[in-house]
Structure formats: structure tokens, C-alpha cells
Image (cartoon, grey):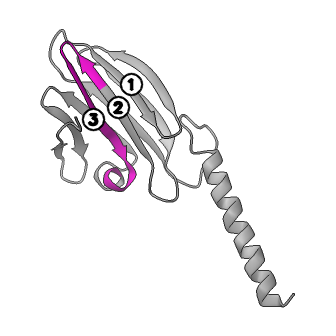
Amino acid sequence: MSPPFSKLIVSICIILLVVAYNFSVSSCNATTTSLTPGVLVRVVNDLGDGLDLTLHSKSKDDDLGQQIVGFQKHYNFQFHTNIFGTTQFFCGMAWIGYFHWFDIYIQRRDEKICGEQCVWSIRTTGPCVLNYSALEDDCYEWNS
């Protein structure tokens, strides 16, 4: 083998090891060190007095289960993003007489808006996230 070819093989092996390592620590609530930032998502029930929020959040790889969140209470979950910029979580949200779902975390959207801590206010009109750079809420329509 020629020296440039050997360097190419070594470089490819290093890249594959980094990618494999990143996938191994990208699951929810990972406590190991990762090459990508950790993200905290906080979901706050702002539906109104007396309305509990039933929340069921998932990603392609992780099902966080169903949570019941009382009015003005919150539910948090943490994870590491992936190096491809494609990390995504969605949540089904229900309260008396209503069911909606929303992409609660989309890496390419949210790393610019809320960075490593995304605080979502769930309202009957739709979800709103605190935009740290604008110091105001960015509100969205429900996916369904």
C-alpha cells in the first residue's frame, strides 16, 4: 500500500469510529460523554386552570412514555443531538376533548431558537417556545 492510501484508510476508520460512538450515546437521558451537545426540553402545561395535559413523546429511537402534567407544571427530558443535524422528537398531546401532536424538537430549527434548553409552553391555541435571542415566544400551529 502506498502511504497516501494508508492515510485514507486510517482517516475513514477514525470517521467511522466517531460516527459509531455518536450513535451509541445519542439516546435519551444518556449520562456518558458525547461529541454533540446535550439538550433539555421542558414542556409546560399552560392550557388553563384545571386542565391536565397528557403527553406522550417519542423520537425515531426512543419512546419516553405517557406523562400527565398538571396545570402550570412541567415535564423535562434530555438527550444528545446527532452529528447529522437530524435529531427530532414529537409529542402527542391530549386534554379533555382534544388531541394534537407537534414536533417538539427539530434540531435544525431549535438549535438556533433555544440552543441547549428549549422551554415549550403548551396552550390551547398551540405550542410556543421561548426564543432566547429575541426574548419572546415563537408560537406554532399544531401538526394535526
* Rendering coords of residue 101 (x, y %): 28, 32
Task: Give the spatial CA distance, label 1 vs label 2.
Answer: 5 Å
Residue 106 magenta-drawn? yes
Q: Amino acid at mark 1?
A: His
Query: Residues in magenta?
Result: 93-110
Query: Which of the marked residues, 1 or 3, is nearer the chain's N terminus?
Result: 1
Q: CB under 8 Å between callouts 1 and 3?
A: no
Residue under circle 1? Answer: 56
Q: Is residue 55 above or below residue 14?
A: above
SS category of the residue bearing label 1: strand
**Mark 1–mark 2 contact, CB under 8 Å?**
yes
Left or right, 22 with respect to 121, comes to right
SS at mark 3? strand
Is most of the magenta stretch helix, strand or loop?
strand
Image quadrant for the C terminus? top left
> What's the amino acid at mark 2?
Cys
Horizontal placement of 143 versus 24: left or right? left
User: Label 2: which residue?
Assistant: 91
The amino acid beneath tag 3 is Trp
Disc 3 marks which residue? 120
Mark number, residue 125: none
Left or right relative to 82: residue 124: left
Q: Name the quadrant containing residue 10.
A: bottom right
- Whichever of callouts 1 and 2 sits on the residue coming sooner in the sequence is 1
The secondary structure type at the circle numbered 2 is strand
Q: Is residue 125 above or below residue 95?
A: below
Using residue 83 as the reference point, say whether residue 101 is left or right of it: left
Residue under the point 64% across and 42% down: 32
